[in-house]
Structures are given as C-alpha cells and as structure tokens.
Image: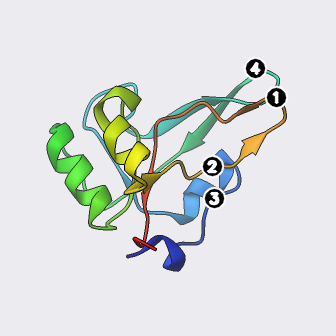
Amino acid sequence: MKAKDIRRPLSPADLAGHNCLRYPYAPFADGWHFLDADGNPVGARISGSLISSSPDTMHAAALAGIGLVMTVPLLIGDLLASGALVPPLPATGRRSWRSARSIPTDGT
C-alpha cells in the first residue's frame, strides 16, 4: 500500500481505522501514547495484523505498506530523511504529535 492510497490519520483517535504493526510487549502492545500540542497525554487503542518483536521485520513491513509502525526515530532516521517513510500525524500547534510511527511514501 502506497502513501497516496492510505487515508492518513489526523489524530491518534484515527488510528482505529488503520493496520498498526504491533510489538508483543508493553507499552506498545495494544495502545500507543502521544503528547498533544499542549503536552497533554493522549492514548490510542490500536490493532493490526502483524505482531513482531523484531524492529527489522516491523520496518520492512512498514516499507512494504503493510501498516503503521511505532519505533524509535533513531532506527528509521535515514528512512525519514530519504522520504521512504513519513510521519503519519500532522503537526498541531507548537509541535507535532510526538510519536515515531511512520508510513511508506509512494516514491514520488
């Protein structure tokens, strides 16, 4: 699935309509946590078809367009810089939603 085909989430609540790639362990097993523009915590319940403890598997699945991934930005910094992955949530207010989830781009 390419980015142009993905209905991009506008807020954490929108994640309910997306395939979220999940790690089997807390704190990301069934929910992802964010800070809004004012620094208030916001939780989102997630579900998805892939559960893996391997960051490499999760990143490959995200690149293949299988779903959204929450990961450490350091691990995908090169993919973000190249545009291969993009943060899925828009900036709001003073800062963007703090997360490390990314979706694949379509390469254009």
Residue 6 in the image: above or below residue 86 = below
- N-terminal label among 1 and 4: 4
Q: Mark 2 points at which residue?
A: 89
Q: Which residue is drawn at 38% across and 50% down?
A: 82
Q: In this view, does 43 lie to the left or right of 74?
A: right
Point out which mark residue 94 bears: 1
Q: How far apart are marks 3 and 1 (CA)?
A: 19 Å
Residue 35 image position (x, y, % from top left): 67, 26
Residue type for callout 4: Gly
Image quadrant holding the N terminus, namely bottom left
* Disc nearer the start of the sequence (2/1): 2
Secondary element under disc 2, as helix, strand or loop, is loop
| Relative to 62, 104 lies left or right | right
Q: Give the label, 2 or 1, closer to the camera.
A: 1
Q: Where is residue 21 in the image (x, y as percent from the top left)?
A: 33, 51
Q: Which amino acid does label 2 sit on?
A: Leu
Q: Name the residue under label 3.
A: 9
Quarter of the image for residue 42 reads top right
Residue at the image position 70 percent from the left and 55 percent from the top: 10
The residue under label 4 is 39
